Amino acid sequence: MIIEREVFKKIEPFVKSKEAIVITGMRRTGKTTTLNYFYNKINSGNKLFFDLENPINRMYFEKANYEEIKSNLEFMGLDFNKKAYVFLDEIQFIPSIPSIAKYFIDHYGVKFFMTGSASFYLKNLFSESLSGRKYVFEIYPLNFKEFLKFKNISFSFGKKITREQFLTLKPLYEEYMNFGGFPEVVLKKSLEEKLMALRDIFASFFNLEIVNFGDFRRNDVIKNLLLLLMERTGSMVDMQRLSKELGVSRPTLYEYISFLEGVYFIKRIRPLSRGKGTEIRKRPKIYICDTGFINTFVKIDKGRIFENSIFQILNQKGELNFYRKKSGAEIDFILDKEYAYEVKLSGDAGDFKKLKTLAAHLSIKNFKVITLKYTQEEGFIYPFQL
C-alpha cells in the first residue's frame, strides 16, 4: 500500500494538463513510489512505465530518429490515436529525454510523468528543451507529520498542547531527530536496521550521484567535504578556511558546494537583507538534507540536530532566510519573509524577548520560539505544531 505524501496533493491539479510532470529530489525519498501512485491513479489502459536504470528499457529511447521510438512504444502497446501516458523513472540515464518528450508532447499530445535524482543535472538538462512544457515538483525526506503517518500514528490537538500530549509526542519527535525522514528508515523497526538503511542510502547517493554523475577528479575530497559540512550544519561556513582544510581552491570548493546543493544533500540559507548596514549579508548558513545522516556519520550537539530537523520541516513550506546582526543577535529562520522562528531546545522568556525585538526591527509581526521543552508561556510552539 502506498502511503500518501503531501506532495501528491501538489501534483494532483496538474495531472490532466498537457505539460510533463517532472519529479526530482534526493535519492531514496520516494520519487519512484510517487510515480507508481500516479500510474495506478490514471484511469486508462493506454499507458506505459519504464525504469530507465534498466539498460533494456533505455534501448527503446536511444534512437536518433524519434519516429523509431514511436514504433517501439506502439510495439509495447501504446495507441497514439488516443490520449497516451508515458511514465519514465530515473531519466538522468538518457540525456536526450527532454528533447524526446518535447517531440511527443508537440506531435502526439503524450502526457509524461518523469523522475530524476540529480537536480543539478536536471536543471541544466531541462533549461531549454522543455521550456514551457513541464511542471517540476521536488520531494524531500518526510516532514514530521508524514513521519507520524508512516508510523500509522494519528493525533489531533488544538492550539494548546497539554502536558500529556507533549509527553506522548516528544519521544516520537526525538526519534525523528535521531534517524531522520527517509521513508524506508522510518519503516524499519530496530536501531540496527535503521542504521544499516542510512548507511546504504548514503553509499547509494555517493556512488550514483557523485561518482557517476558528478564527474569530479577528487571523489575523496567530496567525501571529506560531506563529513565537514555535516559537522558544521546550521553554521555560516568559512569557505577560505574550508578550502585550506580540504586542500582545494576556493573556486573548486564553490563548484563542489553548488553540486551538493543541486543534488539535494545540502541547502544554503541566505541572510535576509533589507538594505540595512548592520547585517552580515554575504555568508549563507548550510543545512543537511536529513538528520539521520548527521547522527550516523558525525557527532554534534543535540541543539544543532534539533535546528536541522526544524529546517527539514520549514524547507518544505516556502522560502527560508535567516537574520544576523554583527553583534551576534540572530533569528534562525525567516519563512517567506513573514514568519520569524528562533529554535531553542530549552527556550525561556528571555529568548522570546530577544526574538520580539529583532522581529520588530524587521517589521515581522509573526514570530515564535520553537522549543522541545514543555512550557505554558506565550510565544512558544513545539515542532509538532509547524
Image: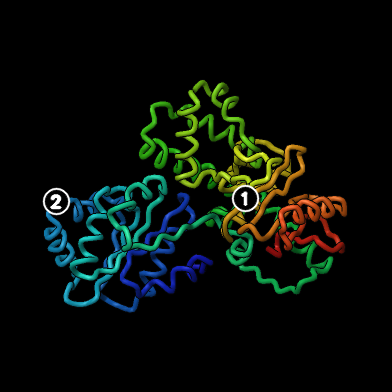
The percent coordinates of residue 375 (x first, y second) are: 85, 60
Q: Secondary structure at mark 1?
A: strand
Task: Choose top left, top right, bottom left or bottom right for residue 22.
Answer: bottom left
According to the picture, the residue beneath numbered tag 2 turns out to be: 64
Q: Residues within 10 Å of mark 1 (few under 14, many from 20)?
A: many
Q: What residue is at 21 percent from the left and 64 percent from the top?
A: 104
The percent coordinates of residue 44 (x first, y second) are: 29, 77
According to the picture, the residue beneath numbered tag 1 turns out to be: 321
Q: What residue is at 35 percent from the left and 62 percent from the top?
A: 134
Q: Secondary structure at mark 2?
A: loop
Q: Amino acid at mark 2?
A: Ala
Task: Choose top left, top right, bottom left or bottom right for residue 296.
Answer: top right
Q: Residues within 10 Å of mark 2 (few under 14, many from 20)?
A: few
Inter-mark Cα distance, 1 to 2:
45 Å
Q: Using the image as rendered, state which of residue 373 and residue 191 is in the foreground.
A: 373
The percent coordinates of residue 18 (x first, y second) are: 31, 71
For the rendered model, the colour scheme is rainbow
Q: Using the image as rendered, state which of residue 215 and residue 89 is in the foreground.
A: 215
Residue 228 disc label:
none
Q: Using the image as rendered, state which of residue 8 and residue 105 is in the foreground.
A: 105
Q: Is residue 187 visible?
A: no
Q: Is residue 22 visible?
A: yes
Q: Amino acid at mark 1?
A: Asn
Q: Tell me if label 1 and label 2 are in contact, CB under 8 Å.
A: no
Q: What residue is at 68 percent from the left and 63 percent from the top?
A: 386
Vertical side of 100 occupied by 81: above or below: below
The percent coordinates of residue 229 (x first, y second) are: 58, 36
Vertical side of 123 occupied by 218: above or below: above
Q: What residue is at 47 percent from the left and 57 percent from the top?
A: 138
